[in-house]
Image (cartoon, rainbow, N blue to C red):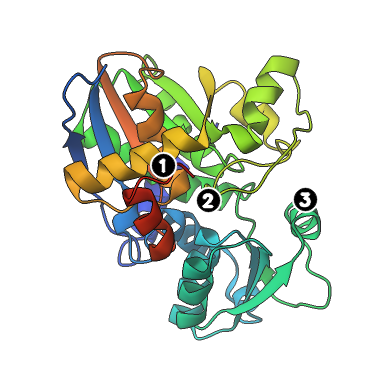
Amino acid sequence: MIELAAIEAARERIKGAAIRTPLVRLHVEGAPAEIYLKLENLQPVNSFKIRGATNAVMLAPASERAKGLVTASAGNMAQGVAWAARELGVPATIVVPDHAPEAKLAAIERLGGQVRKLPYDDWWNVIITSQVEGVEGLFVHPVQDRGVMAGNGTIGLEILEDLPDPDAVVIPYGGGGLTAGIASAIRALRPETKIITAEPETGAALVAAFAAGHPADVDYRASFVDGSGSRRVLDSMWPLVQPLVDRALAISVSEVAAAVRTLAERVRVIAEGAGALAPAAALAGRAGTGKVVCVVSGGNINLSKVAEILNGATG
């Protein structure tokens, strides 16, 4: 677990960068649960990643930050790091997979980040090794940095302050840093709340890990749910995540698209694919009954894709 004191300290450290996002009710007739949405898509970079990125960068020695910042990201962590770099007046180099959506790439460039595209396998290797050949600077790992996880955990503090008694919190699972942070806060303050993760069926590595009892390779396929899912749970994250998660779910891409449509229609919220995973799980009844909080992790999605989904596309 991430220590509660580290999460509480992170909340003070990231003030002025990350905002406190609202928790709103999703009203859908016949819904299987009382569903609430934690709207991290409303952050300045339209994603929760600004929390962890800011905390990790501010924890690092100034001498390391001065060389510039580096990360590997499908898009959202990239924006968090690029935002922090701009505030510090240092360069940011962002390594992205070659299928990263244009909406995220454009946002990185608006913030002054330099984008380097790599094939997915090469990009995933950067995630594993924390190294980018030929690039200097402080590498901010998008997942396994404990400062990043502590920053992410501030979401858990806010959820319980706004809704003290949730029966479950559903979290989209990508690399595990969001889950580890939020779940650590929830476990420390309200251990009876269930922690449920949601991944796309096209890359449900955590589901496979729980089935096997250890990280296992899956047949990852790229989809519009680009901010979640992977080929394999990071070996470094499995011992941390495994005891914190009560249930891991795989969600079909068509269910995610339907959830994107529902959020747009009912609460006028634009969610990216990963951001709609948790609501998709709750709306399908797979997160149980009672009070279910769904983390809408981000809203960085190509508008053309939103238009397709609103017009009935299923993925």
Residue found 66% across the figure and 19% down from its top: 210
Measure the alpha-carbon separation of dots 2 and 3.
23 Å
The residue that mark 1 highlights is 257
Instruction: Specify the amino acid type for callout 2.
Output: Phe
The residue that mark 3 highlights is 128
Q: Between residue 84 and residue 169, name the one nearer to us.
A: 169
Q: Is residue 214 left or right of residue 240?
A: right
Up-down relation of residue 54 to residue 172 (above or below): below
Measure the alpha-carbon separation of dots 2 and 1.
9 Å
The residue that mark 2 highlights is 224
Asked if marks 2 and 1 touch (Cβ < 8 Å), the reply is yes
* Position of residue 112 measured from the top left corner of the image (x, y, whole percent): 51, 83
Dot placed on the residue nearer the N-terminal end, 1 or 3? 3
Q: Between residue 169 and residue 5, name the one nearer to us.
A: 169
Circle 3 Cα neighbour tier, 10 Å, few/some/many (<14 / 14–19 / ≥20) = some
Instruction: Specify the amino acid type for callout 3.
Output: Ile
